[in-house]
Image (cartoon, grey):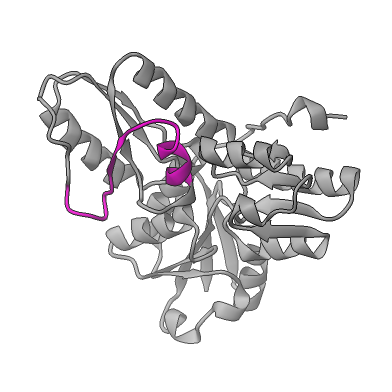
Amino acid sequence: MKIYIGAPRGFCAGVVRAIDLVEIALERFGTPVYVKHQIVHNSHVVDSLEAKGAITVEDVDDIPEGSKVVFSAHGSPPEDFAKAEARGLDVIDATCPLVTKVHNEAIRYDGEDRRIILVGHRGHQEVKGTMGQTGMHLVDDREEMNLPDWDDDTPVAVLTQTTLSVDDTKRSIDDIQNKFSNAIIRNDLCYATTNRQSAVKEITDKIDVMLVIGAPNSSNCNRLREVAEAQDVPAYLLNGLDELRPEWLEGAENVGITSGASTPEYLVQQVIDALEPDEVIEVEVAKEDITFVLPKELRD
């Protein structure tokens, strides 16, 4: 068996920063440190931090007054910050800077009297945070196209969730541009989303099956599976070796492997080791050297 492994894969800069913030908070302030929503969408990461004393909650109201809390990498609506202030919480904001950029764009374009369309997945934590910044219309590529009933010359700004399918997002943006002649397009798909999907596309013509290592609630992991399937390659999402099914690999001589931006690399290596391949070929489409600085109050 040959394994073709995508590169880049695994943790992005925003995920590394968010995990670092929880670990630094635990070291500096002791336990407990609360985390609003899963810090990143991977249960192995969450379990590891909880073993060190982090406590994950979904609602700010469930955090004891005066506690320290880290807001997750996906971003939060202003109302959560207001709730935290009312409860006297010490908030460490782990929002990915690329998500914060989308929030700032929403506020900016609203101030310029543009109507805002967000391309994103309804109910995702990132979308909740972005839609909380100001009024906007959501276009979800998984649903029937529901463009707003605005005049065709309405000034519009189009923002996107950072972890969507590159191809699906392009189709949604094309539909929006076909209706609205005065549209500013801010395609906010992040570098990690784009690179990991490009790596999958580069691999698919070489393999019989694709394994995507990552959590079922991870948007970017699900998009990687869908990218492979769109190339007519069977693809499976598994969050670790214990979820690997032998029948997925029956008759497969060439196996593709990648992982999402919130997946620890050791989970990938465990799967590779278990498969005992004759050869592992890394297919690299880009180099990533991006890092994000920590909030100044937590820098050494």
Magenta span contains residue 55 = no
Residue 75, horizontal then vertical, whole percent: 54, 41
Of residues 188 and 154, which is closer to you in this image? Answer: 154
- Which residue is at the front of the view, 271 or 92? 92
- Bounds of the magenta segment: 126-145
Q: Quadrant of residue 269?
A: bottom right
Q: How many numbered marks appear?
A: 0
Please say whether residue 236 is visible from this viewpoint.
yes
Q: Residue at x 12, y 19 (%)?
A: 153
Q: Position of residue 234 (x, y in %)?
A: 35, 70
Q: Is residue 135 magenta?
A: yes
- Residue at (36% x, 31% y) in the render: 187
Residue that extends furthest to the top in the rendered view of this protein: 112
Residue at the image point whose x is 67% and y is 32% from the top: 291
* Picture quarter with the C terminus: top right
Height in image: 238 above or below 157? below
Q: Relative to the observer, which residue lies in front, 64 or 262?
A: 64
Query: In the picture shown, does residue 77 fall above or below 229?
Result: above
Q: Position of residue 172 (x, y in %)?
A: 23, 41
Q: Residue at x 57, y 42 (%)?
A: 80
Taking the image as shown, residue 289 lies to the left or right of residue 153, namely: right
Whether residue 39 is visible to the viewer of this picture, yes or no, is no
Provide residue 284's location: percent of width, then percent of height.
53, 45
On the picture, is 141 further left or further right than 4?
left
